[in-house]
Amino acid sequence: FYFEIKKSEFRTLNCYRSAISSTLGRDPRTVFPVGQDPLVSRFFKGVRRFRPPKSKLFPTWSVSAVLRHLKTLGDSKSLDLSTLLKKTCFLVALVCCKRPACLHNMQKVQGYWELSMSGLRCQTLGLSKTEVHNVAPPIIIEPFNEDPALCPVYHLVRLDKKLDKLRGKDVVRFWLSSKKPHNPVSTQTICKWLSSIITESGAVSGTARDVRSAGSSTALQSGMDLGKILQA
């Protein structure tokens, strides 16, 4: 039904296969898990050849257009908390080339967090996509003094002062919700912040995963050392 009528892609069908296999377990006749039954495996090999997974290589939005939009939002002093959170989050994600899950793991813990007008140095605490066996390199951001309206450090300091007034006693995660009771946000919320900034700039569409690739590509095109980009 999903293959012939709904024309579902390989990844969608494969998710359904995994869910069914983990629920039903092994087939008593073949001893194989349902998802690894020879007939099922042959079917999915055919689906993969007939409808190979597609991967979008290049974002449909421009970094320069988004940055121009961010400048029109006004000075950070005049921004409401919700807008300041989104703008700061986008600037941080763009310059450090990290996944939203990595930003979610930013925590204000002594010895792992240093923030001042001279820069940010943060060792993320927690596991994200590629950190099961290897510790992620720290997030290091230097101030962009040429344009304070686009300086992530300047916005981080301003945001940090506001969030400290709302942060609970035992809350160490940096990113908090702009809505009461101002609890720490999830990775999904950070993704929504990033995508909303992209669409608000006039782009037809844009996802949070695009920010990392767009940031690294733009840095390379501007002449930044490839080794530093790969270290991020």
Image: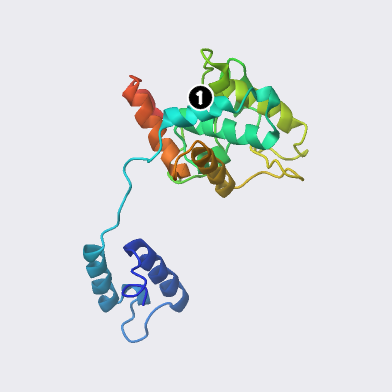
Q: Is residue 121 left or right of residue 98?
A: right
Q: In the current view of this chain or complex, which residue is farthest to the bottom?
A: 29
Q: Position of residue 62 (x, y in %)?
A: 40, 33
Q: Which residue is mark 1?
A: 140
Q: Is residue 164 left or right of residue 116?
A: right
Quarter of the figure with residue 4: bottom left
Residue 34 lies, with reference to residue 12, above or below; the image says below
Quarter holding the C terminus is: top left
Residue 19 lies, with reference to residue 140, above or below; the image says below
The answer to whether one can see residue 120 in this image is no
Residue 39 lies, with reference to residue 211, above or below; the image says below
Q: Position of residue 74 (x, y in %)?
A: 62, 24
Q: Which coloring applies here?
A: rainbow
Say what secondary structure mark 1 lies in. strand
Q: Residue at x 78, y 32 (%)?
A: 165
* Amino acid type of the residue that numbered disc 1 sits on in the rendered structure: Ile
Quarter holding the N terminus is: bottom left
Please name whichever residue, 27 or 216, is drawn nearer the observer in this view of the structure: 216
Q: Is residue 173 left or right of residue 195?
A: right
Q: Residue at x 37, y 40 (%)?
A: 59
Mark 1 residue crowding within 10 angstroms, few (<14) / some (14–19) / many (20+): some
Q: Position of residue 218 (x, y in %)?
A: 37, 28
The answer to whether one can see residue 225 in this image is yes
Please name whichever residue, 226 or 37, is drawn nearer the observer in this view of the structure: 226
Q: Residue at x 50, y 36 (%)?
A: 201
